[in-house]
Each structure stands twice: as C-alpha cells, then as structure tokens.
Image: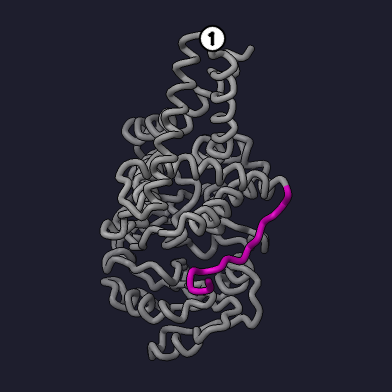
Amino acid sequence: MLSILFWVCAFGLFYIYLGYPLLAGLLAKLRARPVRRAPYGGSVSVLIVACNEAAVLPHKIRSLLASEAQAQIGEIVVASDGSTDETAQAVAAVGEPRVRLVAFPERRGKASVLNDVLPQCRQEVVVLTDARQELHPQALGALLSNFADESVGVVSGELVFREESVSTASARGMGVYWSYEKFIRKSEARFGSVPGATGALYAIRKALFSPIPASTLLDDVLIPMQAVVRGFRCVFEEGAEVYDDPTFSPSREAIRKRRTIAGNAQLVLFHPEWLLPWRNPVWFQLVSHKLGRLASPLFLIGTAVTSLLLGDVPLYRAGAIAQAAFYVLATAGALAQRAGRRAGWLGVPLMFVRLNFTTLAALWDAVLGKFHPTWATGREG
C-alpha cells in the first residue's frame, strides 16, 4: 500500500511539473490553432486600477502615449481605489485630455472597482494594465492585432523581468520559474486557450465582461475564464511585452504568491462547474496547469514520508536521499541569499521549495475562507 502511495505521489509531481508542460508543447505542434492577426482598426479604452501609485502613474501614462499604437487609445481611465497619496494630482499633471480619473473615496478592492468602472469604458475593447510595469512601444499594437480573429475574446501580454535585476537567489529562481510558466502558456494558447491572463497587461472585448465577486483575488484569471466558457479564446501574445523588476524581498514575494495560489483555490469555490469537462472548454488546461499545483505540496509530503517508511528497500532509500539532497540545495540557496551573495542556480530549488510552502499556506487560507481582495503596494510599506 505504501509503495502504491509513493508512486501515485511521484507520478503526480512528474505530471504537474514535467509531463503536462511536455504534453502541452506537443499539442501545440500537433493541434495548432493559428490566430488570424491584423492591425486593429478601432479605438480602445485603457484601464488602470491603482491605489497609492502617484509615484509611477505619470511614467506609465506617458509610456502608453508613446506607444506606436497610441492613436488607437480613445481614453485612459485611472480608477483610484481609495488612494491617500497624490494620485489625483499626478494624473492631472500629465495634461492629456484622453486621461480621466475615477476616484473612489474608500478602498474596496480591485474586483469591486472593475465591476463599477469597466462597463463605463467607452470603447469595445478594454486594455487592463497595472501602474508599475512599463510597456514596450510595440506591445499595444501586438496585443490588439489578435482581435482581428473573431474567436478571440481575451489577449494576454507577456511579462518580462529585466535581466539586470536578476541577481539574488530568489530573483533568479523567479526568472527561471517565469520562463517555464511562459512556455506552458504559449503552448496552451497555440492549441486552444490559456486559463487566465497576465495581470500586468491583458485586453478583453467589453461585451464579454460580467461582474465578478467583490472578494475575487485573481481578476486576471476569472475574467478571461468567463469569456472562455462562453466559447471565446484567451490567447497569449508574446509580442506584447511589459517589463518589471523581480521582487527582491522573499517575504513580500511569498505574500504575493500566497494570494495568487489562494485565488486559484477560490476559483473552484466560485465556479465548481468548471471542474466538469462538459462545462469547461479548457478543463484539461485548468486542472493540469492551475489546480494541479495546489496538490503539489501534498504529493511532496507523500513521497517524502513513504520513501522514509520504505527505506529498507534500496529504490525508495535512493529516493529519500535524492529528496534530502534537493532540500539541502534549497537551504544552501537560502543561506547564500541571507548572506547577500550570488547563489546562481541554487535559486531554482529555493524557489521550488518556497513555492510549495506558500501553496500549503494558501490552501490553509482557502480552508479558513481568508480571502482579502485588497492589496498593499511596495510604496505603502
């Protein structure tokens, strides 16, 4: 019985982290569904939901206005979610008539703001982007070109971490993880749809938006999924690059990731019908990509415990030693990071272990119903 449990857990880990990505890559080649692209002829609304982002909003707005597709921007809407800084003054200082501020006096969370503001946007396509990240000049045009295909309802941009910022073990591990994640998303988009978008930059046909629960943590997954279950595609546009710096604080990155993972669990609570293949066109991608990772720490615990209990058998003893060696490497990466030294590829096992510890904490949050829709920026301390 213990040996069966070991192999079930081992296979689960293999499928989640290696089997599914390889299968997605194969399907992208064998069952490719090309997207018809052409220059977008209409105007779009750009929506930025911000809280205390006065320091970065002017630069973000100017980067949008410097885009090669800036002529297609009909309006830039900055929705201030209870900001207590000088957000209003920062937006006004840009002096651009296409920019308008919608200010809410109390902080309610991004989902509530989207429910109020997105339906009021004046154009048929709405581009959602965060205040912090900088867009490539060609990003907006590349993103919008996908809407020439009538089957496309949502388009996700590509988040790129600046290479010069990737120095610490944590940041390097995050960079490797994000490259791995982007490979999966690109593959999913090529054979069907991605179960979610990149929150830093994505666009949706406004008619496909439906109000989301106020406690929603992952609007960039729930909103695209609503379009997908209505029969539209969510595709990944690698030419729509948006740039960011990796988080240098492990504790802050853990909070962000814990919130993201709890949000994946929250999706099931909101829409349990999405677990049924006949109700969800991307059931395979959602279960294999998003939900499978929720089970990852349980599989890790299962393989560790069973390999130790079966340690008198050479095969399982070797498995226990291999796992112990991996955790030693992760610990070495953590020590190097604490000492302020470059840890190289030790950041990869460190990131993996931290991710799974965070997943356990996020699952506990989900069990307790601890979903907090508001989020503190680094500028808020």
Q: Secondary structure at mark 1?
A: loop
Q: Position of residue 142 (x, y in %)?
A: 30, 60
Range covered by the magenta-colored residues: 368-381
Q: Which residue is mark 1?
A: 312
Q: Is any part of residue 281 visible from this angle? A: no
Which residue is most to the top?
313
- Which quadrant would residue 150 be assigned to in this image? bottom left
Q: Position of residue 352 (x, y in %)?
A: 45, 40
Q: Residue at x 48, y 73 (%)?
A: 379
Q: Position of residue 285 (x, y in %)?
A: 49, 38
Which amino acid lies under the numbered mark 1 shown in the image of this protein?
Answer: Asp
Depth check: give the residue in front, 93 or 163. Answer: 163
Q: How is the image coloured?
A: one colour
Which residue is most to the right?
368
- Which quadrant would residue 245 be assigned to in this image? bottom left
Position of residue 316 in the picture relative to residue 160 (left or right): right
Depth check: give the residue in front, 277 or 110. Answer: 110
> Exactly how many numbered labels are in the figure?
1
Q: Position of residue 118 (x, y in %)?
A: 55, 70
On screen, residue 44 above or below 91: above
Using a 10 Å C-alpha cutoff, classify the residue at mark 1 as few (fewer than 14 neighbours), some (14 to 19) or many (20 or more): few
Q: Is residue 236 magenta?
A: no
On screen, residue 105 above or below 31: below
Position of residue 2 in the picture relative to residue 44 (left or right): right
Q: Residue at x 30, y 45 (%)?
A: 344
Image quadrant occupied by the N terminus: top right
Which residue is most to the front?
339
Decide whether the magenta segment is chiefly helix, strand or loop: loop
Position of residue 324 in the picture relative to residue 239 (left or right): right
- Which quadrant would residue 82 be assigned to in this image? bottom right
Q: Is any part of residue 274 visible from this angle? A: yes
Q: Residue at x 46, y 27 (%)?
A: 323
